[in-house]
Amino acid sequence: MSSVSESITDAVTQTNVQVVGDAPAMAMGTLYQTAAHSTGLMFENAVHAQNNQFTLAQTALSQGIIQIYSLDTIADAIAIAKMLESAP
C-alpha cells in the first residue's frame, strides 16, 4: 500500500474548501442575474403593452375623425333616401 503525499492531500483539501466557499457567492450571482433578466423582461413587456395601447388609441381617434367627417354624407344620404321614398 502506497501512502499519498501530504502536499497532494493538502492541495485537494484546499480545492474542496474553495469550492464550498465559493458556492454562496455563485448562488447569489445567479440569483442577481435571474432577477435582472426578469426585470428586463418586465420592462420589455411594459413597452410592448404601451405600444399596443398607443395603436388602439390612434385607431379610435382615426375612427372618430372619420365619423365626424362623414356626418354630412350620412345626413345627405338619409335626406336623398327620404326624397326618393316620397317621390311618385
Image: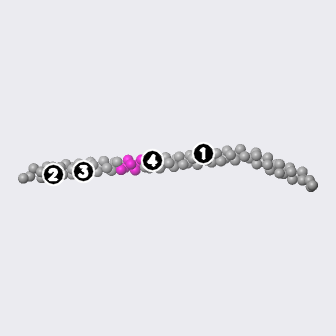
Left or right: where does residue 77 sit relative to residue 67? Answer: left
Numbered range of the magenta stretch = 53-59
Q: Residue at x 24, y 51 (%)?
A: 70
Per the picture, the main secondary structure of the magenta-coloured stretch is: helix
Q: Which residue is mark 2?
A: 81
Which residue type carries mark 4? Gln
Question: Tag 4's secondary structure?
Answer: helix
Distance from disc 4 to disc 3, alpha carbons, whole Å, reads 30 Å
Count of numbered marks:
4
Q: Residue furthest bottom?
A: 2
Give yes or no for contact between labels 4 and 3 (Cβ–Cβ under 8 Å).
no
Front: mark 3 or 2: 2
State the residue in front, 22 or 68.
22
Mark sitting earlier along the chain (4/3): 4
Looking at the rendered structure, the secondary structure element under dot 2 is helix
Q: Secondary structure at mark 3?
A: loop
Q: Earlier in the sequence, mark 4 or mark 1?
A: 1
Q: Which residue is mark 3?
A: 70
In the image, what residue type sits under mark 2?
Ala
Amino acid type for the residue under numbered disc 1: Ala
Q: Which residue is tagged 1? A: 35
Q: Is residue 82 left or right of residue 51?
A: left
Instruction: Count neighbours of disc 2 (C-alpha within 10 A) and say few if under 14, some if 14 to 19, many if 20 or more.
Output: few
Disc 4 designates what residue? Answer: 50
Q: Is residue 58 magenta?
A: yes
Earlier sequence position, callout 2 versus callout 1: 1
